[in-house]
Amino acid sequence: MSVIFLVLPLALAIVALAVAAFVWAARRGQYDDLETPAIRAVQDD
Amino acid sequence: MLTIGSPSTGAVAPPPDEHACAHCGLDVPRGLLEPDAGQQFCCAGCRTAWAILHQNGLERYYDLPDRRDRPVQSSGRTYEDFDHPAFHALYVTGVPGGLSRVELYLEGVHCASCVWLVERVPLVVAGVVRAELDVRRSRATVEWDPATTPLSAIGRTLDALGYPPHPFRGMARDGHRRREDRAMVARIGVAGAIAINVMLASLALYSGWMSGMEAEYARFFRWTALLLTLPALVWPGRVFFTSAWAALRTRSLHMDLPIALALAAGFSRGVVNTVADSGPVYFDGVAMLVFLLLCGRYFQLRGQRAAADSTELLFSLTPLVARIVGGNGEVREAPAEGLIPGDVVEVRAGDTFPADGVVESGVSSVNVALLTGESRPVTMRAGDDVFGGTLNVESRLRVRVTAAGEATRIARLVRQVEDGARRRAPVVLLADRMAGWFTATVLALAVVVGVAWMQWDPARAVDNAIALLVVTCPCALALATPLAVTAAIGRAARSGILIKGGDALERLAKPSTLILDKTGTITAGAMKLVRFDGPEWVKPLVVALEAESSHPVAAAFREGLGLQVLPEVESSRHVPGAGIIGRVGSHDVAVGKPAFVESTGAGRMNRPVPALGPGRVLSEVWIAVDGRVAARAWLGDAVRPDAAQAIATLQREGWSVGIASGDATPVVLAVAEQVGIDPRRVVGNASPEQKLALVEATAWRQPVVMVGDGVNDAAAIAAASVGIGVHGGAEASLAAADVYLARPGLAPLVELVQGARRTMRVIHLGIALSLAYNVVGVALAMAGLINPLVAAVMMPASSLTVLMVAWRGRTFVEARP
């Protein structure tokens, strides 16, 4: 029994977590406006 | 810390040119220069905006590298309807803490510094807690304390800064769209994560396939890839199957049909082989396809959204609330949609007319730019017709309503714009047109391959047929158009050409008929002093007298003669539609139409009319001093310097160029002659409705491109195959346009047409390359040389090639930053 049988599902579980976080952020509107925040960041005073 | 521009020192650096407007940086007309003042302004709008920024310590705006480069044109509206309960019921929502929130659509948001300025409104207007701007959608979310600050004050401030606000209607539709957009982003993320992980599993399989791998590991990786790909197909990839199914049911052709076919074929073969524990699986290719295709689809969707958003503005042209005058003369407020013909309404200075009507009492000037494109106010008195949506500038008017609501002229125009947009058949993009025979060819080839292989190696027949289906998946083909169009639109935008959709580019690539508006498009749209014929000593008298007037002729004199030291004006009287008369520096001076000056008792001047250059139709103005005509002047709307050359270039490229203008026919003909347009293609005296009819009649025979700047052109622009709005036009009219030229002059029009042709060339190149890949793929599959590894390399390779071509292709020349 190789370690791959354990590690691969584990890695995929972590990926699943990341994907879930991304989907949550997308549904909350975090990616609605991709232009204005970029402009805001360089205009701080 | 990242900073751009020069560091703020708190003090304003003097403008580089002493004749430049302190706010917008444009040249200040000589007549408006104030030698003693520290700053010069090109207009009252810029002066107000500058004052607001300074009173609130926002001078850093002038250090921003990318600020607006056009005069602030404040509309002068009072925005009192923003405070009406009906307005609040419709557009304003409450937020915790006793605050209110409203979404406003702002005109004039084009640059990065707009974000800076709009988001500092809380510093300018007390009581505003938060202002956030979405620069791509031109939409600001404002939260404020309604107990201390009326919304109209916020509206007026935004207006003074050059961003006239409008309430954002259609929140419900917007919410739906927003959910759709978010779902799309989520799908792309999921598809991307899955594609990469399936790739990893497949990589293990491929290396095992090269160097040997124990069967249990191969089985493990196959099942892993299968279990990963399944969700990619049922969640993000479902869109292709639903759309292919819809295309099948309506018997229409769509690129999704061959895509769904390849996805289904590849996946089912993979499942069968996984279960059978032998043979190739195509999971990596399938997962990658889903991801790449979704990206292409996202670009397309974003373009369509921008087009739909801008029509929003047309709905907010008329006010919500009207002030109805009752039988006893009392005034009450009522919703404008409840008006009926016969009602008398009161319209105060700074308000827009709620309906069409006839002036009952009062004299005022009215800005009818909305309907005619004419920017100078028109004097209206009892008996004159006024139209809903136009702006009362000067003083209070009472108006008897003749048409309200849907029957008003502006409502009819808006409806025509909507109809035009709807009637315009959706362009079947080149790739979609190819979908039909593409699917048929691929299916036929797959059958041929299957049958042929049956003859000499039945065991490999199915695999080879499937391999052909997968490897010919038109992924690159489907990507070629949206990617090239997105890249071209992005580049065009950076050089001041804003394009809403890819279909406009496709239609502009082939020369057809082009109809230009005159005022504001071919000409600059402002009166200019062309010639002054008279002694020098008359000039100061004229300028001093005209300084009393706000008429455009007066502005032309001030600017054209540009004198600083002026005699004193003792009295002056403005005779509407004729001229101005007064006493200046102990002389009686009259300036105006020849007939008017003669009527003041001045004798004729017996000098020949000087040559004014070929074909110019100009307004003649006489100047009488102490009862004798002392000088004459000619004024005209100057043709833009680049117009003749631009039109000649377009004609050389095969465009048939014509003019449709609301101006008098002789004037239009003279301009046509000057810029080299065939007089047979010139239509003068055209109302908005006639322009529309002309465009429709032409569009019947061949594609027609309409270029204009006012709402009077809006219906024609919407009905045209491609509508183009030009710099300086009414922003509301741009809603109807497919393209907006944000730079003055006609040179951008030439750039647009040439860029469109180059973009189509890039698209064709991309399609040709992806087809070439497919031909190679088919040949390999027929020879039985395709295996999943070859397929997995070929598919991304073809997509990447197309992507490179689309991204690097020369389409629009970018303006250097």
Image: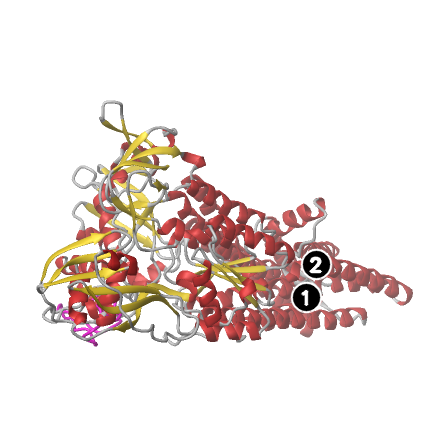
Question: Looking at the picture, which amino acid does disc 2 mark?
Answer: Ala
Residue B615 on image: x %, y %? 44, 71
Residue B435's disc is: 2
Q: In this view, does B373 lie to the left or right of B392?
A: right
- Which circle, 2 or 1, is nearer the viewer? 2
Of B455 and A37, the residue lying toward us: A37
Residue B99 on image: x %, y %? 23, 39
Question: Looking at the picture, which amino acid does disc 1 mark?
Answer: Glu
Of the numbered discs 2 and 1, the one sitting upstream in the chain is: 1
**Contact check, label 2 and label 1, Cβ < 8 Å:** no
Of B463 and B484, the residue lying toward us: B484
Q: Is residue B168 above or below residue B4?
A: above
Q: Is residue A29 magenta?
A: no
Of B499 and B787, the residue lying toward us: B499
Count all numbered tags in the image, as a single digit.
2
Q: Mark 1 points at which residue?
A: B214
The span shown in magenta is B4-28
Q: Which chain carries label 2?
A: B
The image quadrant where one finds the C terminus of chain B is bottom left
Q: Does the magenta stretch include residue B5?
A: yes
Q: Quadrant of residue B174?
A: top left
Q: Mark 1 lies on which chain?
A: B
Q: Can residue A21 be seen in this view?
A: no
Label 1 Cα neighbours within 10 Å, binned few <14 / some 14-19 / many ≥20: few
Label 2 Cα neighbours within 10 Å, binned few <14 / some 14-19 / many ≥20: many
Q: In this view, does B564 lie to the left or right of B599?
A: left
